[in-house]
Image: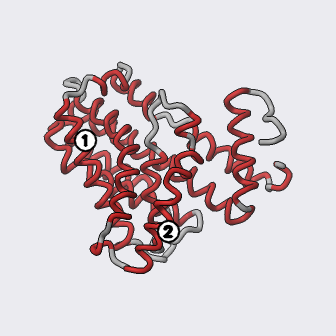
């Protein structure tokens, strides 16, 4: 019952549900470019799809390396504005040079977002230098990879976490035993592949927006600003849920999460079972 959670934590969970179940990246990009972004993405040439897939995987590999090599136990404060400024600058280059800049711009943007996600994780009591927390940071790229038309039953927050749970556990065990990403292995590759399959959805939306002839450097910067803000919102939601799970237990938090989500979708109180 909601009474089991204090009002501040319940309010934090309500905000997390909004960020995780109702992401607004596609809508924001549509407003920026003046056209439905999902339709623009469909019109991208096959060469763009190949470039996006390659750049997405490379970006996530570098993000995981950054998570494991450079994160420390020190509880630095969030610096969202700095990260947004850096991502905006890289987006300006992407907008100015188009698809040809993607192999450089996307991995750079992904690393910048990774650092921002790790700061958010720390602020919610995580230690991103620990393998499981580091992987949870990378997991945010999958959690934020939802198209506006996705079926909520297949792409909801807990559905995606469940899909990745086994791989995250195996990868965390692998990293704890080996202690270095250079040793690599099929487990880490499988994790990156699973995340990339979802992250690539929103990367396609971003590239589609930046590829429009009228966008240019200024529009490219605005697209990247929206891009990183989207993943910062998802990260805050994700690590809020994890913090509450450590306090109240996973079962209670999930029950309250689903109740809030039901109320938001239907406008009616959830059935008691939820």
Location of the C terminus (image quadrant): top right
**Residue at label 2?**
132
Q: In the figure, is residue 274 to the left or right of 15?
A: right
**Residue at label 1?**
52
- Farthest residue to the top: give it: 35
Above or below: residue 248 compared with residue 205: below
In the image, residue 120 lies at what x, y percent?
Answer: 51, 59
Residue placed at 37% from the left, 79% from the top? 178
Residue placed at 47% from the left, 50% from the top? 232
Along the polypeptide, which appears first: circle 1 or circle 2? Answer: 1
In the image, residue 222 lies at what x, y percent?
Answer: 33, 36
Give the structural element (helix, strand or loop) at label 1: helix
Above or below: residue 116 compared with residue 27: below
Give the structural element (helix, strand or loop) at label 2: helix
Label 1, label 2: how far apart the Cα atoms are: 27 Å
Residue placed at 57% from the left, 50% from the top? 237
């Amino acid at each position: 019952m909601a009474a089991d959670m204090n009002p501040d934590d319940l309010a934090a969970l309500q905000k997390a549900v909004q960020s995780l179940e109702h992401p607004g990246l596609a809508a924001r990009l549509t407003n920026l470019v003046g056209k439905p972004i999902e339709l623009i993405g469909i019109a991208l040439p096959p060469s763009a799809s190949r470039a996006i897939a390659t750049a997405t995987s490379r970006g996530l590999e570098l993000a995981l390396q950054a998570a494991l090599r450079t994160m420390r136990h020190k509880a630095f404060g969030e610096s969202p504005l700095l990260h947004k400024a850096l991502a905006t600058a890289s987006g300006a280059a992407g907008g100015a040079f188009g698809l040809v800049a993607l192999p450089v711009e996307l991995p750079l943007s992904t690393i910048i977002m990774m650092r921002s996600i790790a700061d958010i994780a720390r602020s919610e009591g995580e230690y991103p230098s620990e393998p499981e927390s580091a992987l949870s940071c990378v997991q945010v790229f999958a959690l934020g990879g939802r198209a506006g038309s996705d079926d909520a039953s297949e792409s909801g927050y807990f559905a995606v976490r469940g899909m990745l749970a086994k791989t995250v556990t195996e990868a965390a065990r692998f990293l704890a035993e080996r202690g270095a990403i250079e040793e690599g292995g099929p487990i880490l590759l499988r994790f990156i592949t699973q995340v990339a399959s979802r992250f690539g959805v929103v990367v396609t939306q971003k590239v589609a927006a930046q590829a429009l002839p009228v966008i240019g450097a200024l529009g490219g910067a605005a697209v990247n600003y929206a891009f990183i803000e989207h993943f910062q919102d998802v990260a805050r939601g994700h690590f809020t849920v994890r913090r509450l799970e450590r306090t109240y237990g996973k079962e209670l938090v999930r029950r309250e999460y689903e109740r809030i989500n039901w109320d938001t979708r239907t406008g009616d109180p959830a059935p008691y079972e939820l």
